[in-house]
Amino acid sequence: MLTGILIAAAIVGGTGLFIGIFLGISGKKLAVEVDEREEAVLNELPGNNCGGCGYAGCSGLAAAIVKGEAPAGGCPVGGTPVAEKIAEIMGQSVEGQIHMTAFVKCAGTCEKAQQQYEYTGIQDCTMANMMQDNGPKGWSYGCLGYGTCVEACPFDAIHIIDDVAVVDKEKCKACGKCVAVCPKHLIELIPYEQQTFVQCNSNDKGKALMDVCLVGCIGCKLCERNCEAGAITVTNFLAHIDASKCTNCGVCAEKCPRKIIIPRQIPV
């Protein structure tokens, strides 16, 4: 009986030893060499894994940077400070990055936007957008205010105030997650230093828009005609500001009869 137990133990032990040696040799033979720079780059990234860079997470971006598939400044959260550190690791130079922030192109609050029916379904913008007339608001371009963007933001930088999403530019990291989930395509990334904004995204003609919203852009072109920098163009009844040309003089905001061009973004 004892002999049988010893033989079994020897077999099990010998098998375990063989497997251990085999795995050890295989690990060395089949090991994939990892560029030390990849770990160094990963250590400099903020670790939010927000996906704003276009990769699954920080490790994916680090690998892409080392392979030359992504720039040293590929992380929107880290900004210029992180980009400079990564560029140093990679032996590269990095051009000055523009600090970006998200902006919601809608001012249709409860008092200013007409509601055409009461929505009682799932409190989600994507679901509400699938309802009659693309939601309960009187026009199909306005913020629905159910907070899908709020849920998507990993930095608590966007909140619903008076039925409209508002971005806190001091908290925003420009990861783009709110931009991706908005079913109305109301959110865009703009330069942090930009001081003038068109808070509307409607392409409805003047009368049609005025019937349902007190502040929407009617495409009158007063802003376009008075902009000396040529930074504003009106297309499809909607004004748009080219941030690369805008001098933030504020003339457009003064001339706008609807007061939909605001001189600065309102913080939360």
Image: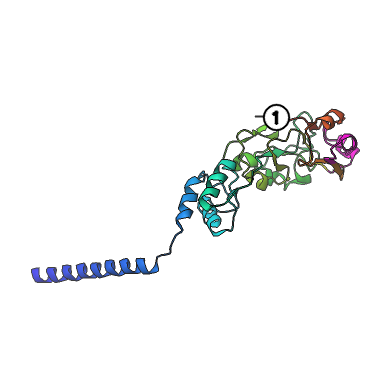
Q: Which three-letter amino acid code belongs to the residue tagged 1?
A: Ile
Q: Residue 149: which quarter of the image?
A: top right
- Residue 33 shows in this picture: yes
Residue occupying image coordinates x 8% and y 68%: 2
Read off the residue under disc 1. Answer: 266
Crowding at mark 1 (Cα within 10 Å: few <14, some 14-19, many 20+): few
211 sits to left or right of 46: right
Q: Nearer the viewer, residue 129 or 203?
A: 203
Residue occupying image coordinates x 60% and y 34%: 171
For the C terminus, which image quadrant? top right
- Residue 238 shows in this picture: no
* Place of residue 252 in the rendered image (x, y in percent of width and height, measured from the top left): 84, 32
* Place of residue 87 in the rendered image (x, y in percent of width and height, measured from the top left): 55, 49
Which span is picked out in magenta? 203-232
254 vs 56: above or below: above
Q: Verify whether residue 220 appears in magenta.
A: yes
